């Protein structure tokens, strides 16, 4: 009889132990919701994010903020121009940091909002709360990656070009051959060449079909910059004034030029040439 009770007790103890072990095995370890889950395949580790990004960001008191950001391994360079307000280029350099998720950078030397979400060949400028702008305005807050081809300068050619500019551009006459990408066809009835003349005293004169135009110009030859100002013209009314109006508009907005002594191109930033000329000998 005692042996029976002893056997029953051992069996009961065995069931109890198995039950406890099962309960221990099925316990669930709680997850700390404050821990950031890191994706190994993030922008920092998976994208070729270094390079130059450019775009126009919204501006409260100007037309737009032309923004260029160049990212290196740990540092950045940022250039901004407040279009319609100033031509001055504001430049800053510094380091940037990544967030824990590896998808957003913060420009440490820049005023807030200074965070950018890094995408495939694009930077998304985040708001003051670190959020992306959604909806129809989302594209206004993007900087797209651009390709920059580095040209190794030839010192001899550079000297030659500068000498030509100093000698010829300030005392030269040019025939207009292209305007906004369109070839200029001289009218059979035209008695004068369409084009522009640079005088040595910083004045210029121009003609494009109807009225005489004149004004001042300023060259910064070391950086191939040109600015036309104080432009005035006669007030005749002609049958076709479209070319003249387009030409006058180009003179208002161009800010740089390409010149080799035989051809002259007037440009706006890195856009395609707005006006192209050949020298009149």
Image (cartoon, helix red, strand yellow):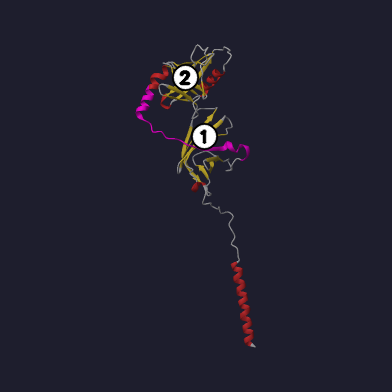
Q: Residues within 10 Å of mark 1 (few under 14, many from 20)?
A: some
Q: Quadrant of the N terminus?
A: bottom right
- Residue 41 covered by magenta stretch: no
Residue located at (51% from left, 46% from top): 43
Q: Residues within 10 Å of mark 2 (few under 14, many from 20)?
A: some
Q: For this view, does 14 lie left or right of residue 158?
A: right
What percent of the width, then of the height, locates residue 115? 54, 42
Residue located at (61% from left, 78% from top): 13
Q: Which residue is at the far front?
A: 188
Q: For this view, does 175 lie left or right of residue 20?
A: left
What percent of the width, then of the height, locates residue 207? 50, 15
Disc 2 on helix, strand or loop?
A: strand
Q: Which residue is at the far left?
A: 156
What percent of the width, then of the height, locates residue 128? 58, 41
Q: CA distance from mark 1 to mark 2?
A: 27 Å
What percent of the width, then of the height, locates residue 109? 49, 40
Q: Quadrant of residue 223?
A: top left
- Please, is residue 209 above or below residue 161 in the view? above
Q: Which residue is mark 1?
A: 67
- Residue 136 covered by magenta stretch: yes
Disc 1 on helix, strand or loop?
A: strand
What's drawn in magenta, residue-wise?
Answer: 134-163
- Residue 141 - label: none
Q: Which residue is mark 2?
A: 217
Q: Quadrant of residue 238?
A: top right
Foreground of the two, 30 or 122: 122
């Amino acid at each position: 009889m005692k042996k029976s009770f002893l056997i029953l007790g051992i069996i009961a103890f065995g069931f109890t132990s198995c039950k406890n072990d099962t309960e221990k095995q099925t316990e669930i370890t709680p997850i700390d919701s404050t821990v950031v889950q890191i994706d190994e395949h993030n922008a920092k580790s998976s994208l070729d994010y270094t390079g130059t990004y450019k775009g126009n960001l919204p501006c409260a008191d100007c037309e737009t903020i032309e923004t260029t950001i160049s990212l290196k391994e740990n540092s950045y360079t940022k250039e901004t121009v407040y279009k319609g307000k100033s031509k001055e280029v504001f430049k800053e350099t510094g380091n940037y940091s990544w967030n824990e998720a590896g998808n957003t950078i913060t420009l440490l030397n820049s005023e807030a909002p200074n965070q950018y979400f890094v995408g495939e060949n694009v930077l998304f400028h985040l708001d003051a709360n670190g959020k992306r702008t959604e909806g129809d305005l989302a594209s206004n807050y993007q900087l797209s990656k651009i390709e920059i081809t580095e040209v190794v300068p030839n010192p001899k050619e550079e000297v030659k070009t500068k000498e030509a500019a100093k000698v010829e551009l300030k005392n030269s006459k040019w025939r207009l051959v292209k305007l906004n990408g369109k070839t200029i066809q001289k009218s059979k009835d035209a008695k004068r060449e369409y084009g522009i003349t640079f005088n040595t005293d910083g004045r210029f004169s121009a003609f494009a079909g109807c009225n005489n135009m004149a004004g001042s110009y300023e060259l910064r030859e070391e950086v191939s910059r040109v600015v036309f100002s104080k432009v005035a013209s006669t007030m005749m009314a002609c049958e076709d004034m479209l070319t003249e109006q387009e030409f006058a508009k180009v003179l208002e907005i161009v800010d740089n030029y390409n010149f080799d002594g035989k051809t002259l191109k007037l440009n706006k930033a890195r856009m395609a040439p707005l006006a192209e000329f050949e020298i009149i000998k």
